[in-house]
Amino acid sequence: MPLVTKPVRWPLMLVCAMALGSGCSGQIRQGADWSPTPVSGAGAIRSPAFTCTDSQKKLRGTAFTSMRRLSQHELQSTLTALVGAPMMANMKVSAPVAGLPSDQTVSAGDFEAGIPVDQPRVLNQVAAQIATLGLADGAWRKARLGACAEKAVADDACLATVLRQFGGHVSRRDLTEAEVTQLTAWYHSVGGGETGLRLLIRRLLASPALSFHVEQGTGVDANGRTTLTSFEVASRLSYFLTDSMPDEALLTSARSGELASLEVVRAHASRLLQSPAGKAKVRDLFRYYSHLADVADPAASVAASHHIEAKGLGLAMHDEAFDFFEDVFWSPASPGTFAELLTSTKSFAKTDALKKVFAAAPDAPVGLFHRPALLAVPTERTSPIQRGAHLRKLFLCDRLGLPDPAAVQARQTELGDLESMSNREKTDALTGAAACTGCHTMINGPGFAFEGFDPMGVPRTSEQTFKPDGTVLKEWPLDTSVEAVEFDIGFPTSYADSKVLVADLAQGVKAAACFSQRVVEFYRLSTVDSDRDGCALAEAEQAAHAGSLRDVVIAAIANEDLAFKD
Amino acid sequence: MKFDTLSRRLVLQGAGASLVLPVLASLMPRGALADVVANAAPIRYVQVMSPYGPSQALFYGALKGVTRVSPHVSVTSLSDYGANISPMITDAFGSLRPKFSILRGLDVFVVTANHQFSFATTASGYAKGLDNDEAPPVTGQSSIDTILASSPKVYSADVPAERRQLNLNPLTTDSYSSNRTWSWRNNGTKVQMIRPVKQTQALFDALSAGFVTKQVDPNETALLQAVSADYKAVRNGPRISVEDRNKLDAYVALVSDIEKGLTASVPVCTTPMRAEEVDIEATIDNQFRILAAAMACDLTRVAGITLGMSEGYGTRHTEHHGILGNPPGIVADYKLIGARVARLLKIFDNTKEAAGGTLLDNSIVYWSTQYGLATLGGQHSASDMPVMIAGGARGNLKQGRYLDYRHEISGTVTEFTRQGIALSNLLVTLFNCMGLSSADYESVAGQGYGYVDPTSAVWANRPNPTQWDTEAGRRSPVPLLYSGPTRG
């Protein structure tokens, strides 16, 4: 299939809208241009499925409106690919790059567009170090610059080899003859010889390709989009999936024109996804999707009730959740689907303490939403509001308005101390005012459903608090039922508990669509635009319903959007 | 240059001696302002911020506005209190007490008050529906430090961008705030958070050009000119958007800064001492000393410092929701933050300036937190922001007092419902100290700085509303703190 000409076939997308009559929106199709103002007005759950209309097809790729700078990690990886890991192990080289601002994103749109003010100086400093260290090492010269340059650059022919090899790698494309000629002239103008070579290496390492994803394109198509060169397509694909420059195989495909075929692009995507850098990025995808930067240790009294030491348990839960995600994503024995992610019964506890947590209820559901890492809190009581809001915001991509803090405070004051109540009673009382019910109808329901799990994420049949020694201090009956809450298109509105709720979400549209959106946001380091990104989102969502998680990533990245910019 | 100077200065500083740095006009780096030439020290601005927000008891302790000096301002001298003002403002601040004031009753009048990093430095919340720490301030304005850093009233045009605005964030243990600052920049298309410098060496490198003597190598100039040419070639290429051209121009300007640094007659400033970074406190102190040395040598005049928590979001966020119960972890962190701020102020106050006074006397150090004081049900609020303003701003600030701007308790107004004035006016005060007037910080003439949501319930209840409803009111400094010229 050609990368840019043949339209993709689309499944019939479910379109449905339900009036919710609240201040919260269950829409998923918000993008970078999403207007936040409707949240305070009457909201409605719109279709959670993404669409790819004919007009959207003409917009493919136009969400790429400008050249993005390289993130700190991309710069680090690119330098490593260019000069080798041993060189980057030198603190004089790696430390200045590590000192640049970190670009790890937590939410879509976090990535700061502006170049860090210290980056040109750092790049200049690092390039000087690399040139000095590299040129003093014959093996490095031979490997990176070419065999003819192992000891010295004897003539312009050797210099041209250096430029084509090292300069081409830096630029992530083949240099033109004019560029080689121009750089050769400059080499001589600064003295030639070893001095000239040192300055040339520094110049190349400080070039625009090390700071920006330079995309100049080849022309403009009938829809007004700029068409990228095959080398630029290769770079996009590689940076999206590995945070680094294209490898030789990808550059070779770019050079031969093979990347005009979507099948070839997807084959490279599949290969890159499975590379060490691709796998590391998949692990980071889970951090982004789950918001599990860290997991706090549970309260000591709660841990004591299970005869478990709390210290270190948060980290063990964190690691277990990541291992679980990676297993679903990668295991050849698993279907690796989104539904499996939500319903798998596998666990990966490595510490005795965490094994006890899982052993406490061996038949309990353990899919992603039921993992201890996602359910555990460091307090002695769970928070249905927090759990419900997290499910809605993180995993269903719902937009939730915020309460007026003054109103919350007034309500708290009016009600006084609620700690003698069960969580459910307390939550109902706090959020029972007319101004609160719109949003809290959406939030409290899932929160109550997950009340079947204690503050450590262990299943429970009653709500309890504990004395420091772990014996029961107070106890309340538990009610995990949910009534009349919309979760997904065409699905029931009443659930007995979180297990049946999650089973439905696993088969539904909304959670899978949300995961697809998160994948696009994460790999593109951007918010999504429901029009311009609609086709990529729809393809990713289709994969989430019908394929594996790997398919979702491939569909989100290796698609027609790669070939264009605005 | 490796920041590894274990010099005699280390011994001197360890013994509590002053760090004296040259501020003679002839030794100033290019870009020093006219007031320096006139032998007056420049005024420096430092904001120190921390995640979450303390309780009343933690920050203010027993402080009480005793003397009502105007209908809506009560005052108490800090000297009336014992060694420890509060758990966060302890005897570690000791002799500095005449050099700072503690302010109460400063509100950000927004209806959106939840996770966000903009309240204290932009006096703004975020757009409704965007519950997100990095949702930009709804004003669309840059934060105060960014406005100062780009103002010709603070820096002359040839001061490199890298030195105009430093952002330190030395802690690495807090996953929530470790990559964040309270600095926001409007880059023309959107407002985004500025990322911090984490490592001491990186901070030092950003300033190192001012700490060393340079020998100009013509090849270095040729190289930087060639690098600039490479970026210009892309910029002038086909199918490059205006936005991309601006980005490339900005990059070329930064390369040009490096080139200028090669040839500038920069003085040799005293290299700050370095202690072995055996723990986070040593790292923090190293970075504080670099900042002080750089400011004393006029390498920079604007900085932001993020002092995070010792644990990340999972633990501290939950504790913050229960902060009225004094969870030991977050309470310990807040006490530690107080001790760190005291150390920063001492380092500044131990730095004598040739033009007179200490670095602290010629600086503004603005200390606040992400949220206002925690109340029952209102832990993530933007009301009642805890504020300390330290430093004399070269005589523009009257210090040593507790200033309470809230309603007087009477009738239906209780301690619980006392309302304050707009934090916007505090930031106006700081702008005024730095020589900026409304024309420099207003994006819409007459609106003042920051944002006041007129639909906010709290806005309707503010004390002395007529004062703040007028254009002049919005452009006014907070009462009784500022003693400089009227800026308008």
Image (spheres, rainbow, N blue to C red):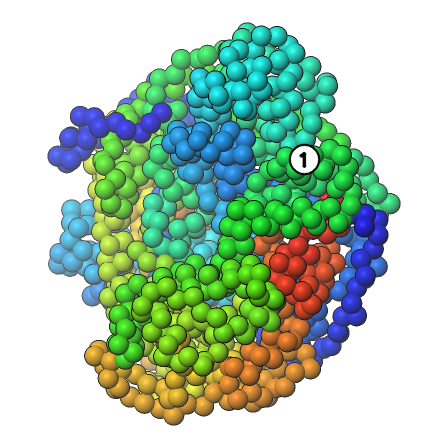
Quarter of the image that includes the N terminus of chain B: top left
Viewer-closest of A456 and B65: A456
Q: Residue at x 34, y 21 (%)?
A: B212
The answer to whether residue A217 of the structure is visible from this angle is: no
Figure check: B381 above or below A257? below
Determine whether the residue tagged by mark 1 lies in a helix, strand or loop: helix
Picture coordinates of residue A315, whole percent (x, y): 36, 61
Specify the amino acid type for callout 1.
Leu
The crowding category of the residue bearing disc 1, from other C-alpha atoms within 10 Å (few below 14, some 14 to 19, many at least 20), is many
Figure check: A526 above or below A392? above
Viewer-closest of B434 and A507: A507
Residue that protrudes farthest toward the front in the picture: A333
The answer to whether residue A549 of the structure is visible from this angle is: yes
Q: Which residue is mark 1?
A: A251
Viewer-closest of B151 and A164: A164
Figure check: B486 above or below B290? below
Residue B350 appears left or right of A352: left
Q: Residue at x 52, y 81 (%)?
A: A499
Figure check: A26 above or below B45? below
Residue that protrudes farthest toward the bottom in the picture: A477
Q: Quadrant of residue A15?
A: bottom right
Q: Quadrant of residue A363?
A: bottom left
Picture coordinates of residue B188, whole percent (x, y): 61, 44
